[in-house]
Image (cartoon, helix red, strand yellow):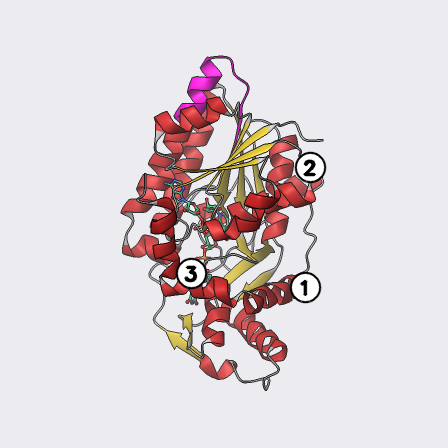
Amino acid sequence: MSNFSSVLVTGGCGFIGANFIRYLFDETDFRGKIINIDCLTYSGNPENLSDIVTKYSDRYVFEKLDIINYQEVCRVVETNKVDLIVHFAAESHVDRSIHGPGEFVQTNIVGTFSLLEVVRKLHAEGKKIRFHHVSTDEVFGSLGETGKFLETTPYDPRSPYSASKASSDMLVRAYSHTYGIDITISNCSNNYGPYQFPEKLLPLMICNMLSGKNLPVYGDGKNIRDWLYVRDHCEAVWMIANKGKSGQTYNVGGENEWTNIDLLNSLCEISAELLKKPRDTFKKLIVYVPDRPGHDRRYAIDCEKIKKELGWKQSVTFAEGLRKTVEWYHNNLTWIEHVKSGEYKSWLEKNYGERK
Ligand code: NAD
Ligand code: DAU
């Protein structure tokens, strides 16, 4: 049984946040209320939850809100008697952080600071509230051919994105240590699955295959990522929020390392098979392009702590997860069209107005 009755999710219209809200409603015994605050940046899409809005209308509330808006966040938290905040909202794409780091500093650092101030205020008033901060393995930097990131690995962020996430992790830890607020942190590896914005490797490649575009591989294609199906990440976050020790950090990963080029070749084969095309149809679209500046070579997560202490484990195999993911995009062409065509943007303006 869950400890919580009212959960505030930040960034619930994004990829992992939307999957987390779905997971809580559909796959757990949680019977409380979920309040989703999201200011709907380019990657925030309320369509990701359109069925949830009707299916759980008595237990789901959406507020279009920037996490940086301290007064409004206080109002939402107090009105709904929130006892858990799960903080996903962020600028999340490394390439974008290279082109424009400002928004990453603003949302990921200042936005997280603002949420922590809300929690500090409530804590000082004697209210019981837990803050779970969702972070990334990228804070640990880049690995050589061997070794894995442990919770104790020193931070060594190398992109504006990972530096902003590392800063936010540090603020969360400092608030726990200094003010005694109840926090937990997770550092997770690369997620994949439905509803991921098609700027990230997997959905970008699947969408490019569908429209016959090139498949751009950065550098030599030998960079390694550790892939985890998004549903398993959501389960880990929920377990940590409910059973994790206050003040603790937990690594979460797939134990599933792939070079980008091997992964892309598999993806090409699955897509060809599902679309009943010759096996090498999509491989012909692969092109090598100039590398991402400062491109981290290898990530790999040691997740023994969450396995031993909380009993979490991955439940979706990579073969199963990849196939499900490709099928989802093939079956959701309208979603892709909305996200890519800009129609989604005007839909946003019509339905939600300007960013508050
Ligand atoms: P995403 O870009 O798909 O979603 C981010 C969401 O946050 C969007 O809905 C966006 O509108 C919202 N948002 C952005 N700025 C906001 C603000 N100022 N106020 C309110 N809402 C705002 O990102 P994602 O891939 O779902 O990542 C979610 C979290 O998980 C991030 O904190 C990211 O660092 C972390 N993470 C992601 C991965 C991954 O592989 N995608 C892995 C580990 C950790
Ligand atoms: O490790 C967790 C992180 O994973 C999260 O914190 C980030 O939010 C998430 O975006 C992701 O970061 P990456 O940089 O690893 O993901 P991305 O999908 O952008 O790239 C994955 C790998 O594929 C990386 O080595 C770069 C490469 N790549 C990416 C794109 C978009 C290409 O070769 N070509 C591409 O077009």
Give the CA separation, mark 3 to mark 1.
Answer: 25 Å
Mark 1 highlights which residue? 320
Between marks 3 and 1 in the image, the one whose residue lies nearer the viewer = 3
Give the CA separation, mark 1 to mark 2.
Answer: 24 Å
103 sits left or right of 112 in the view: left
Mark 2 highlights which residue? 310
The answer to whether 285 is drawn above or below residue 311 in the figure is below
Q: Quadrant of ligand 2?
A: bottom left
Mark 1 or mark 2: whose residue is earlier in sequence: 2
For the residues bearing labels 2 and 3, Cβ distance under 8 angstroms: no
Q: Amino acid at mark 3?
A: Val
Mark 3 highlights which residue? 339
The answer to whether 29 is drawn above or below residue 118 in the figure is below
Task: Give the residue at x 49% y 75%.
Answer: 210
On the image, the x and y values in percent for residue 213 come to 42, 77
Task: Give the residue at x 60% y 46%.
Answer: 22
On the image, the x and y values in percent for residue 9 come to 51, 37
